[in-house]
Amino acid sequence: MLELKHDLSKCLICDTYDCLTRCQYLKLDVESARAEIERLAKGSWSRVLEDCVTCYACEEYCKKGNHPFYFIVEEQERRGILTAPKPIVRQWIQLAEPLGEKPRKARKPLLSMCFFPGLEHVLESRLFEGVDVIMGRHVFCNLVYLHFAKPSLIKERLPKVVEAIAQHGVDEVVFYHDECYSTFTHYAKAIGLEVPFKPIHLFEFLYRRLRELEVKPLGLKVAYQRPCSSRLTPEKEHWVDDIFNLIGVERVEREYDRENALCCGSIFKLQGRYDLAVDVQRRNIEDMVKHGAEVCVFNCPNCYWTLSELVAKRGIKPLLMSQLCQLAIGERPKGWTG
Amino acid sequence: MKDRIYKALVEIVGEEYVSANPEELYIYSYDPGVAGPRRPDYVVLPKTTEEVQRIVKLAYEEGIPVVPMGAGLTLTGLTVPLKGGIVVDLRRMDQILEVNERARYAIIEAGVTHGQLKAYLERHHPRLKHSLPDAPPSATVAGNALIHGQGRLSQQYGFTSDMINGLEVVLPNGEVCRLGSCAVSPYWFSRAPLPDLVGLFVGWLGTTGIVTKLSIKLYPRKKFRDVEVFVTEDPELVPEVVYRVTYTEMVEDVDIWAQPYPPIYAGLQHTSIYLTGDSDEELEFKRRMVWDALKDIIDRREGGFMMLTPDMKATLLATPQPSVARIADVKKGGGFSYVGAIIPVDRFPEAYRRGIKISERHGIGTYSFMARVVGRGHALMFAWSYPFNRADPDSVERARRALDETDELALELGGIPWKPGVYGQRLIMERMDSTALRLLREVKRLLDPKGIMNPGNWEVS
Amino acid sequence: MQPLADIHRCFRCGYCKFTASSPSINCPPYLKYRFESYSSGGRLWLIRAWLSGELSWSQRLAEILYSCSLCRNCVEQCPFKFREELMDMVVAARREAIERGLAPSKVKEFLENLYKYGNPWGLAREKRGAWAEGVKRYEHGDEYLLHVGCVASYEECAQRMAKSLAKLLEAAKLPFGVLGELEICDGNEAYMMGEEGLFELLAENNIKMFRELGVEKVVALSPHAYNAFKNLYPKLSGSINVIHYTQLLDQLIAEGSLKPGRLEVKVTYHDPCFLGRHNGIYEEPRRVLESIPGLKLVEMERCREDALCCGGGGGNFYIDLLGGGPNSPARVRVREALATGAEVIAVACPVCLIMLEDALKAEELEGRLEVKDVSEILLESLKAGAT
């Protein structure tokens, strides 16, 4: 039985309540935060459960590694709170319903593309030469269901997904999708799920590949769009700067980056939080414009799909990290008009 | 007699444009739906109204059936000859004669296709568009208008038949006339305020004359177009969603679709709401109004706007949508047909539920619904689609039976099968006001005393 | 028979007849004949009816089958998953017809001549190299073999192409040679007309000869030959390293081996089907033209993937099912070129050249419009630069 390793007593003796006081959306002071924690401990109603926008940030803010976000999600499910309309949740559950896809024997380096139909074109590059690729519902990380307060579904599907990936017969797997990487490291550990392969983040893979190839410094100013899932594994953040330094790109110092990053807003829209989505997107992009970004670099395909057009309208070119690396080795990413 | 008629037709259109060859007779005896084979005796391709007149005069004198045809894509067999005769394929009459930018209309010949008009307007009149359906771009504009078709502008402006300003028609005795304002004025800009004779040729399925020219209303074409898709899992909510969205008066096309594959769509209803505008501000304003209109449904968690990936958006924004034609490959068999019915919006839930049952009952293996809003929720064109494998006669037969049962369902719902095949026509006439039916028969007899125009259709027994 | 397994999947939706960008019909046989039976969908339905015994073979059916110039517009526009098989279906049906001895007489003539004399007109083999007087013969060790094909070897107007191209390559000091009377037809048309056996014979002979001569790189003058060498020969385990001459000229200009001089002329470029839609080569020929100072390049209403076929493919430059009448695709295309205000239609294919030149005469446009191939235009500019 997979269970979240969360210790409520640690929350009760906390004196900073970083999870709530640093929250970009709830904006609680220490007193209010304490009150909400106590309510949650008693099993009473707390506005945190309704108002949490599922940005994942408190997982990063909690100094005790006590999984506040995962805890909120478990509580939401336990109390039957709907974070998004039922048909939307149902849609997301259905889209990744395994259809009996079977794993095959693969070879290293093995790259998992999670389940992003429509993204295959990013692989047409020397960066991915010789890479074996898998994509499908059977290797879908399922972590998105945290946004929909369905951790039970994740716990139900994840062991089969881990099994399916393991059956490809390699001991380490590169994950294109940041959330996959975070699932098989941070979340798996939090629920006590053993993962028999070593997850490698795309950015580590890209960095090592770039070192093998001839790289021309790009001299670009970029804004980095940090995805929600990066909150779960901030220890790998250095790869972002390592790559940027290697390819001669400046990560503009702006307000909504690193620990202060803003969500792309797509989840907010799914939840029906239209005004919040528009506001967050506006602030984020204004911030990029204000600090002279020429390019917005995306980690997550979902952020990319959500914000591409909006940043482009402001004269900022949208690129996934792997596409930026393509530019650095003299390739033209598919669809690139720059 | 055959030889004599053939020679007479050759004299009218020239040898290259008449055929009594088995190849043409074969092709023109089928439509891409379940209809056929119904063999014509001749296929003829006229170029001018005068040629059409001479063909019809000949047919009138000889008592030979005449079947006018655009692209033949009604899929209910309206262009396959039920009683032999001459199929008149009008697609050589493909001239766009005039576009009046200020009064926003186009005068086109009967064979002008949707794709043609769209490409022409985009190139030469980029601020104008017509109401384009999701039929393939090879379908004709006149055909669509004359069967009370719908298109992308139906929610805003009604049926395509509502967009007709005037016609040039060849009557069954070979005479030609102009109807609408063009009967009196040099401008083809209005159907009103004359006694309406245009109506004698709309919805009559080619049984009263051959339309050779048509003036169609055009509408403003804005720079940008976007789409939002609202998802529900209870079909009972759909009429309310439609009511509220149409109330905003901010949207272009509204259509509701449902299908069980791929799994993401199973059991859900998707209301596509299209927005147009000349600026981001305009689009955003309209989008917000639509969201606000549905806010409490979202807050109640009964419905929500889905996320659209770039691929999905591209598919939804394509005009026309090739994905509609692709229903024909669901059975990998090159075929589908559908019953489209004009129904009151409130009947959506029942149309949906019973449609699923019909598909199950006939072993279709899937269901595929599309309902387009006409007017401010004045009606829905609800389409139940049945794909089949034309290489498997059993599959074709099952589709046929499902279609017939669906014609019956449409009427039970208080709706009316649109562009009905013979079976649907019969069901309609059985239920029709008896005086209206008598009037229908008398008008037909008045215009076509010899019964040569697409015989077998709207035949009152 | 495999491609024919999917033939019943055609819905006859009609997407294949047009393109999205233009109001005009883009399927050559449908454009000319206007009967539904001559469209891509109509043809496939008739093939199916014939093969299932519902329809008897006839002269007309034979013509319908062979009126397809294999321009690939249908593949480009068809919304269905099996679209890539559409031309294979037509070729497979032609194979059936040939096997049963049912091909139209002109087709049989074409193929018999090709078999006996190495060219469709039945002209003497020895005359194949007549155009190449003074042009270096290929020798072992030459970097490039220039393959010109039957049309440019024998048809007088198309010989201009071969001659000007040879002069250009000489001017660029490119180590190349031609085979002259030894050259063997690439076999593309034989393949497309359904004569699989003859195609294989020609291909095997070419592969053998190239191997014996140590040929490493081939420059194809004709896009038809380019297509055969690139896409059909690998099926016979004869991979040929081939480049189209416009691609080579593009390279030679870029590296400075050819220096275009000034030429004040308005040109429109006609995309050949076997270079464009079949092989995705659209930009190199345009770059060559645009590298000429003073040359103004204007596009026709339909260009690149949407270009209208000249109607010469599938052996139609000989069997002539798409010529004649003001609605023949070549004549429609020439009128479209005229509408751009261009003085010259630039072509990159000898078949397009002869089809469009004939159409120009039929349209009585001599004096107002000229057809020239890219190498002729470039050679002119070189000469202008030299003076």
Image: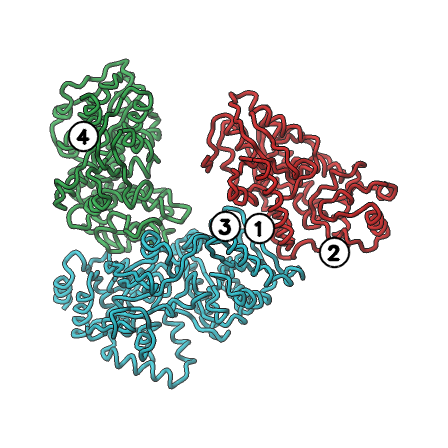
Task: Say what amino acid the circle numbered 1 marks.
Answer: Met
Marks 2/1: CA distance?
Answer: 23 Å
Marks 1/4: CA distance?
Answer: 56 Å
Residue for badge 4: C152
Provide residue A245's location: percent of width, then percent of height: 60, 25
Marks 1 & 4, CB-CB < 8 Å contact: no
Pointer 3 indicates a residue of which chain? B
Residue for badge 2: A80
Label 3: how many Cα within 10 Å (few below 14, some 14–19, many 20+): some
Q: Nearer the viewer, mark 2 or mark 3?
A: 3
Determine if residue C100 is in view. Answer: no
Residue visible at 23% across and 53% down in the picture: C56
Side of B456 relative to A329 (left or right): left
Task: Say what amino acid the circle numbered 4 marks.
Answer: Ala
Q: Nearer the viewer, mark 2 or mark 1?
A: 1
Earlier in the chain: of badge 3 and badge 1, it is 1
Q: Are marks 3 and 1 on the same chain?
A: yes
Label 1: how many Cα within 10 Å (few below 14, some 14–19, many 20+): many
Residue for badge 3: B313
Label 2: how many Cα within 10 Å (few below 14, some 14–19, many 20+): few
Q: Are marks 2 and 3 on the same chain?
A: no
Pointer 1 indicates a residue of which chain? B
Please name the color used to draw chain A.
Answer: red
